[in-house]
Amino acid sequence: MDTILDILAAVIREAISPGTAAVAIAVIGLNLHFGYTGLLNFGQSGFMLLGAYGFAISLVHDIPLPIAVLIGLGLAFVFALVLGIPTLQLRGDYLAIVTISAAEIIRFVGRLSTLKELTGGAQGIQGRTYQPAFVNLSFFGDGAWTLAPFNYTDVADGAGWVRALGGLVFALCVVATVLVGRRLKRAADPTRTAPRTGLDGTLGKVLAAVLVLVGLYALFFAMPVTYGRSGVNGWWVRAVAWTLVALSTLVVYLLVRSPWGRLLRGVREDEDAMRSLGRNVFAVKMQSLVIGGLFGALGGMVYVLASTVQPDALGRQITFFSYTALLLGGAATILGPVLGTVLFFSARILIRESARAWVPDSIMNAQQTEQFSFVVVGVALVLLVIFRPQGILGNKRELRFNV
Amino acid sequence: MSETTIGTPSLADPAARRALMAGVTPEPGAAKQDPILKVDKIERRFGGITAVDVDHLEVQRGIITALIGPNGAGKTTFFNLITGFDKPSSAGSGAHWEFDGRALNKTSASSVAKAGMVRTFQLTKSLNRMTVLDNMMLGAQEQSGENLLKSVFKPLWSGQEKAVEEKAEELLARFKLLEKKDDYAGSLSGGQRKLLEMARALMSDPKMIMLDEPMAGVNPALTQSLLGHIQSLRDEGMTVLFVEHDMHVVRHISDWVVVMAEGRVVAEGPADTVMSNQAVIDAYLGAHHDTDLGDDQVLTEGALDEIESEVRADEAAHEAAEDAKHDQQGDKS
């Protein structure tokens, strides 16, 4: 029983880690590229790395934090322009080729020993050289704090059944949210002529939101997590990271519901049709590439807040993790990127820790369980694409028409 | 009273249209009274093949002009060239075309559409994974909500959005697509997509609409209603240029017909007379089309020999002419 609880605790810690939040922000940007505009950007890690370098190097050189953030974003902006000007006039595949190689170029430039003064070469930049500027901003105070503050240990002396009850409530909330979500989707489907159930629009959404909140509380009630209030890897950095995730989601929501968002989807569907309607397709694609890239850079900055700037940590694999998370959550959906990223990283830790706990070392050692977790995640992605190509939140109706 | 301005007779009246075009000599490149589109020396070569080679063409404002010609005559390429989807090989060496007094030689496809010349495609380009209504709303021009900075603030564009939506629904109702407005465009039938594309083009209030085979693959009943729509567009003062293969359609609605063959404009004229033009008949049927190969008589040896000798004589005459040309050139050099 303790093993299971340990595994679950590790999963939850991974789910709320700043790294997960950082990738979620990058995936939100990728969703704007790939999900809404149809741009095959295989270089999101390049945007992240540039944002991270710009941010960290500026801070190392005693540039104030807000300006350091702007420098990171500015680098990504220039990168997007440099990538976009030659390739966005060509067919989509070219952007994919150019972005993946450009991201690799940035990584290798970061590793150059001649730039060791600036980027730290392959070792990267130590966290303690730039993190204080951010950590010192914390107004959370000192000491440790536990989420949720009122948890199972406060009821009946932390008896096992209280904890199990919390877990049960969480599970029920997940099931109920799925059911409500399905209902909502069915109600929104205009092709269905069957009489609509009482659960419509706003009421359903409020119910779903309440269920999610109750579920989250139940989760942290049963599995409380303790970190330092401030510090390098504490609640402060988590709060900032997840606030940025929420803000990014909000911005993307505001953008894609507007006529501008309609332009993006139009470009995704058919560029020539958009030209015949008098739209400057190049400008639309460029705007999308830049904005998505800025989200990537922001993600990169958050990524290094609680770790180090390490060029190899933000390599190709982060790009492919991002695509996996995006497809898992559902491309061209608002909440899909966040849900997909959290599930992707949690699932990987779940598999890794389970393999570590129950597979004997003679069969699979600690290093191999790490690789094993990626294998399982890969297989899961293949199954996902076959059996639920639209992802968790995606709309299956959209997939009926091959473009 | 009708809404027509005094002085210019409404072109909704067939007699007025006939009178308007009566003064135009039915020959390739004829000058029109009030051309909305003028094309000069536009040529497009694909390697050794000259797909389009139009010396001069004018399209009269306010009427329906049909562009016909056998397969491979270069009609669609011509469309692509003047709408900016393709660039003429003769660009920079005399190619010039202007729309409504504005030169379009160097403009992109999107600026051509903004200038008021909107086209549709032979293979319909509906935006499949968007709803019919969204498709329509993309047709409207000058939307402030499409500005990146304004798009985040809904109050800045919600008013215009509502107006655009109303207009879209009006047009959809006219094209009998209103009950489909929340469906994905990809779920429509081929004919409905043609309708949607035409309606979408109309969202921008174009001065001239260019339809590339609007009737291809559309069932006869729907063709009737499409024709009605096209005519009512003309009656509202829009200029229509369309490519079509169905001669009944062309005869039925066009006020003027331009015939292309092998990239050139070979004939122009009113629908009823241009069909009997020798150049048109040759273009469609070949010069020897009168010879009935289904006739038993031609199966007798004598008749076949006769045809063969005729063809040979033709070829000989042709070669002789060519030789003479070469000789002349040889003399010059």
Image (cartoon, rainbow, N blue to C red):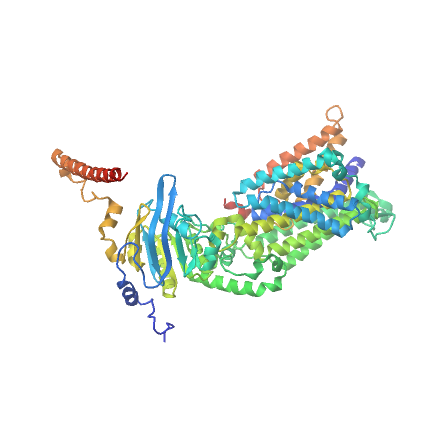
Counting from the top left corner in percent of width and height, residue B79 is at 39, 51
Give left or right: position of B184 versus A364: left
Give left or right: position of B142 versus B326: right
Q: Residue at x 73, y 49 (%)?
A: A69
Counting from the top left corner in percent of width and height, residue A241 is at 74, 48
Given residues B39 and B14, the one toward you in this image is B39
Q: Is residue B237 visible?
A: yes
Q: Is residue A226 above or below residue A357?
A: below
Q: Residue furthest left?
A: B302
Q: Is residue A256 above or below residue A367?
A: below
Given residues A197 and A326, the one toward you in this image is A326
Counting from the top left corner in percent of width and height, residue A274 is at 49, 52
Q: Residue furthest bottom?
A: B1
Counting from the top left corner in percent of width and height, residue A135 is at 82, 48
- Callout count: 0
State which quadrant residue A329 falls in.
top right
Q: Residue furthest top?
A: A362
- Quarter of the figure with the N terminus of chain A: top right
Q: Is residue A28 visible?
A: no
